[in-house]
Image: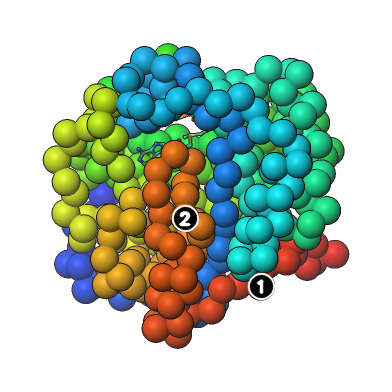
Amino acid sequence: MNWTPAEVERLFALPFVDLMYAAQQVHREHHDAHAVQLSTLLSIKTGACPEDCAYCPQSVRYDTGVGREALLPLDEVRARAAAAKAAGATRFCMGAAYRSPKQKDVGKIVAMVREVRALGLETCATLGMLTPAQAAQLKEAGLDYYNHNIDTSEAFYGEIITTRTFQDRLDTLEAVRAAGIHVCCGGIVGMGESVSDRAAMLATLANLPAPPESVPINQLVPMPGTPLADAPPLDPFDFVRTIAVARIVLPKATLRLSAGREQMSDELQALCFLAGAGSIFYGEKLLTTGNPDVDHDRGLLARLGLMPSAGAGKLPRDAAA
Ligand code: SAM
Ligand code: DTB
Ligand code: SF4
């Protein structure tokens, strides 16, 4: 369904209880409301990124204390993926601080994807901009998902990133889609954007030729040294509203409660699950910042009667086969 930004903005303006009720109805129609998918992140190449994303501690332009680390060796990636699987994750997401990957690194990442998939985990990578040929190479290796966020509205984008355009992001998403890889694409809330920007971002995602299967909604983690270090804190209910509106305009997508969970109370996270979140990043670290510990997360899910979903490498397309 096509959504205009104005229609999406009207959803944001609904009374909180009405928005939550509408989101719950959509969620239960398309998803198991008791299931939460667990993805574990690993930064396979950290820091010294040439881009200038104003939120990011890995940009070489900001003095954030994040050091430069070369691409991890294959053995270490395999061991970390095995540990993530043993802890209960069903997807392993490898993140690299690249504007776009060098061809020689794609060869090494292809080997990582094969190894991680051989463990019976779903695979995801986020490596910056890709060419159609690189996307095809990753697909061939068995990459299930590619994460590439639009981050915000097209109108606000230039306030946050100047080193690549909104259209560059859409081009990579198109290459990923054309290669037959599932698309993971979302954004960040709390960077000083307006409600109209949040609405426009979600309208862009909903109106893609094929909407993303997976949508991470990040709350800004203000990192010292970045231009957004002193961004004013977000009203937590506005974060929940963003999830609820995403639920309504992207009914089939799995919405992931992403960065910022360590700063959220259990009660706020419960509201996010009610609003339609069906996935979390699971494991003590995101890329460079912290995440709740796994015992706390397992306890939280149990207290809410939620179940980690049994992914075990099964994707919608596999199940249909
Ligand atoms: N370099 C690649 C790229 O930009 O596509 C992949 C890694 S990048 C760190 C992945 C995503 O992490 C960004 O698009 C952004 O949405 C999110 N992110 C990074 N820093 C963040 C922060 N401080 N708070 C919230 N989200 C953040
Ligand atoms: C996404 O949307 N959020 C994740 C993942 N995709 C790669 C990354 C969050 C990063 C938070 C800041 C950090 O840990 O460096
Ligand atoms: Fe680089 Fe990605 Fe961070 Fe932007 S978000 S500075 S592209 S690592």
Q: In which quarter of the image is ligand 1?
A: top left
Q: Which mark is residue 138?
A: none
Write the residue at 29% across / 35% down.
Answer: 223
- The image quadrant where one finds the C terminus is bottom right
Q: Where is residue 6, by image quadrant? A: top left
Q: In the rendered image, which residue does mark 1 sit on? A: 310
Is 280 positioned to the left or the right of 174 in the image?
Answer: left
Write the residue at 67% across / 62% down.
Answer: 85
Is 32 positioned to the left or the right of 248 in the image?
Answer: right
Q: Where is residue 320, by image quadrant? A: bottom right
Q: In the rendered image, which residue does mark 2 sit on? A: 284
Q: Is residue 118 above or below residue 190?
A: below
Write the residue at 35% across / 27% down.
Answer: 65
Q: Is mark 2 on a helix, strand or loop?
A: loop
Write the residue at 78% across / 67% down.
Answer: 319
Density class for disc 2 (Cα within 10 Å; few <14, some 14-19, many ≥20) is some
Q: Which of marks 1 and 2 is nearer the N terminus?
A: 2
Disc tally is 2
Residue toward you, 74 or 217? 74
Amino acid type shown at disc 2:
Glu
